[in-house]
Image (spheres, rainbow, N blue to C red):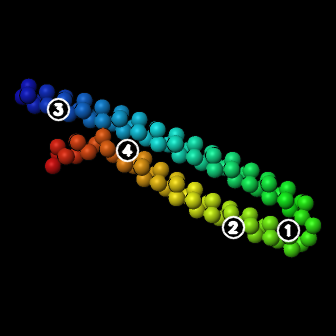
Amino acid sequence: MTQTYEDFSKYGKEFADTGLKSFASLSKGAQAIATEAGEYTKKSFEAGSATVEKLISAKSLEKAIEIQSDYAKQSYEAFVAEATKIGDLYAELAKEAYKPFESIVAKAK
């Protein structure tokens, strides 16, 4: 009976340690995602501001349409690239958060 309690205590401590490691990975990953989102927002705002300045100085309707079309194309491409990057960060976050539990799952099998 003492051995069973010791085993249970050992596995409980191991599970708690693993949970803390996983939480640390989650925190680090969430911080990376937040930083990336902030940088994208800043770049997007700067690009929008620059486009407004170009539109104000446009001499013709055709030039304004061209500026707007270029902005729309660049914005779309930047969004797709950023969405891919954020998706990769979320996938990495999931892998890193699960990694500490791999040994416990392997022992359970």
Name the residue carrying label 2.
73
Furthest-right residue in view?
Answer: 59
What amino acid type is highlighted by mark number 4?
Glu
Amino acid type, mark 2: Lys
Q: Are marks 3 and 1 in contact (CB under 8 Å)?
A: no
| Mark sitting on residue 92 | none
Q: Position of residue 68 (x, y in %)?
A: 78, 67
Q: Nearer the viewer, residue 69 or 90?
A: 69
Question: Viewer-nearest of labels 2 and 3?
Answer: 2
**What residue appears at the point 69 percent right and 50 percent down from the top-left corner?**
43
Amino acid type, label 1: Ala
What residue is shown with label 4? 96
The residue identified by callout 3 is 8
Q: Position of residue 14 (x, y in %)?
A: 24, 32
Q: Earlier in the sequence, mark 2 or mark 4?
A: 2
Q: Which residue is mark 1?
A: 64
